[in-house]
Each structure stands twice: as structure tokens, then as C-alpha cells.
Amino acid sequence: MKILVTGAAGDIGSHLVPALLMQGHTVRALVKDLSEADRARRNGVEIFIGDITDPRTLNGAAYSVDAAYHLAAAFFVVNAGETLRIINYEGTINVANECMDKGVKRFIFPSFPLVLGPHVTPSPPMDIESARVATTSFHALYKRLCEQHLHVLNEQGKLSATILRLGTVYGPGIRLITTLKKFMQAGLYRIPGSGNNLAHFAHVEDVVQGMLLALSNERASGQTYNVADDKPVRFKDFVYELADLLGTPRPGTAPVWLFKVFASLATAWAAINKTTPIINRDVLNFSLSSFAADTAKTRDELGFRPKYPTIYAGLPTCVDAHPEDERSKAG
């Protein structure tokens, strides 16, 4: 099959593309500029430069394509309300329109469980219209609106979309891990609030597994699935386990208000210097929200079986074999 991948140079895309190539697929990577093209370029990958926020630049991106993974999205931005609407919501509509125009048969879209609002009981992949709790971040809001839009296209028979609600993605080279390691090794990281909020994680290799299964199984057409490991944990347990593997002290906590001040300052600094903020209030909001996912449907219908069923199995892949090597890096 010929597969279009947006966000091919990103955390997930950089792992998905090699897996698609190994299965014998042809990949076209939609990237925004030459720097992304360099990161996405590899044998067997066709590069198409376009901006998902400008539909004029997308014409032809989905030509002769059988299926598309729309992974391109923004997180760490200065003005979350406006920027995420343009990139994450309107950008998704633009890519979906291009795929409809070119007759793409399958459209696979990553969402996440917080579209249902914060919750601690593992939730099955219900329709968002059934969600009783409001979203707590712009990121969740626009993912929710994307799901609604794709659901309508499914109902109208215009585009066969599969929605994968991903747990918090971690793994080697994933930004969450690289950032935590950097600050923990420098002794600068603190857990926001109590750290008792429930989080459900997914190793990037298992995310790729879920995405490949969604592509190969016709039953996935028009369906929504949760992709996560077998056991949600408190966020602080995730941090503690990473610290233990790195051989660094377990971080303490800091008040949420202090993180809000830091996020506001980081955003203001990024706006002045035209850079990407290390954190913003929106990222902080969904980082503090509890969520858990029921993966029974994904297992039963797609045959999903996490290679890393818990963070305790997956986090060792994120550090060097010897903790002293990680400590020397910090020095």
C-alpha cells in the first residue's frame, strides 16, 4: 500500500515510518519545511512539502495514496487557544479534505482519552457525545472536535476514519522522556502538585503496533480504539521509576500555582524570542488531569497485545544499560 504520513518527523511518526517500510509499504511523508524533510528522509520515503494549515499547499499530497496517518499536531505553543485551533483542528480538516478529494480509503487519526474529560475509572472508547465531563485543555477540546468531524464523515460515507485514543506516549527519544531526563539529571525537576493524578501510558512501540493493526484490519474502519498499556499509574510513580533507573534522587513536589507561574513566564519568554516554550498552561492542565483507558475492544477486535504491559517493563528501554552512564551524561 502507499501510505501518507503527516508528522513523519515527529515522536511517533519517526517510529511509525520505519515500521511501515519494513512491512513493504511505500511511504509519502508530508512535512512542513526542509528541516523536517531532512529528519523524515530515508530510503523508500517520498517527501511532500506542505503546510496543513494552508490547504493550497496540500493539493496532490494524497494523490494515489491508499491510506493516511494524520499525526501532525502542535503541543508546546505560545497561544494555545488560537494556535491549536488552527493547527490541530483546522489542519486536520484540511488533511481530511485532501484525502477525500483523492479517494483515500483509510484515514487513521490519533486522539487521546481526555477527550472524554478527566476520569479515573478505565473508560471504554465511547462516542464523545456520551462523555459527561468537560475537557480541561484546548488540546483535548480540539481533539474532541476532530473526532466529531471525522465521525460525521464516517456517517456520510465520505472518509473511512479510525480513531486511536493514545495513552501518554513514552519511549526512547520521545520528548517527554528526554525532557524529564535532562531536568532530573540536573536536579531541577519537581512533580507538579501531589503527583497522585492517574495517568495511562503507552510505549511508542506499542503505539506503532496499534497503528499497524488499525491499518491491516478492515474491522477498524469507522471505529474508535484505546491504545495503552495494561495498568494506569500515578504520575509520580512514573517519575519515581524513571529516577530510580537513572540513579538520580526521586524528585520532590512543587505547588501547582508555582508551575502555573513558570508556564506563564516560559510562554512570555518564548513569545518575545519567537521560540517554542518548554511548557505552557495548556500542557500543564492536561498533565494534571487523571485518565485511564479500557483497551478490551482493541485487544478483542485488533489483537492488540502490549509488548510493554506496564511502565516498569517499558521505562528500562528509555535509559542506558548502566545508570552510571546516565549520570556521566548529566555531568
Image (cartoon, rainbow, N blue to C red):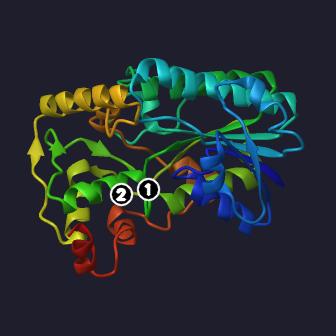
What is the secondary structure assignment of the residue under circle 1? Answer: loop
| Residue projecting furthest to the front | 273
What is the secondary structure assignment of the residue under circle 2? Answer: helix
Check disc 1 and report the residue beneath it: 174
274 over 68 or under it: above or below: above
Disc 2, disc 1: CB below 8 Å?
Answer: yes
Quadrant location of the N terminus? bottom right
Tag 2: amino acid: Thr
Q: Nearer the viewer, residue 215 or 16?
A: 16
Quadrant location of the C terminus? bottom left
Give percent across and percent down for residue 22.
Answer: 72, 69
Check disc 2 and report the residue beneath it: 178
Distance in Å between CA atoms under marks 2 and 1: 6 Å
Give percent across and percent down for residue 322.
Answer: 28, 81
Q: Nearer the viewer, residue 221 or 138?
A: 138
Q: Residues within 10 Å of mark 1 (few under 14, many from 20)?
A: some
Question: Would residue 311 be seen by someone viewing this image from the given angle?
Answer: yes
191 over 230 or under it: above or below: above
Q: Nearer the viewer, residue 84 or 49?
A: 49
Give percent across and percent down for residue 19.
Answer: 66, 64
Q: Residues within 10 Å of mark 2 (few under 14, many from 20)?
A: some
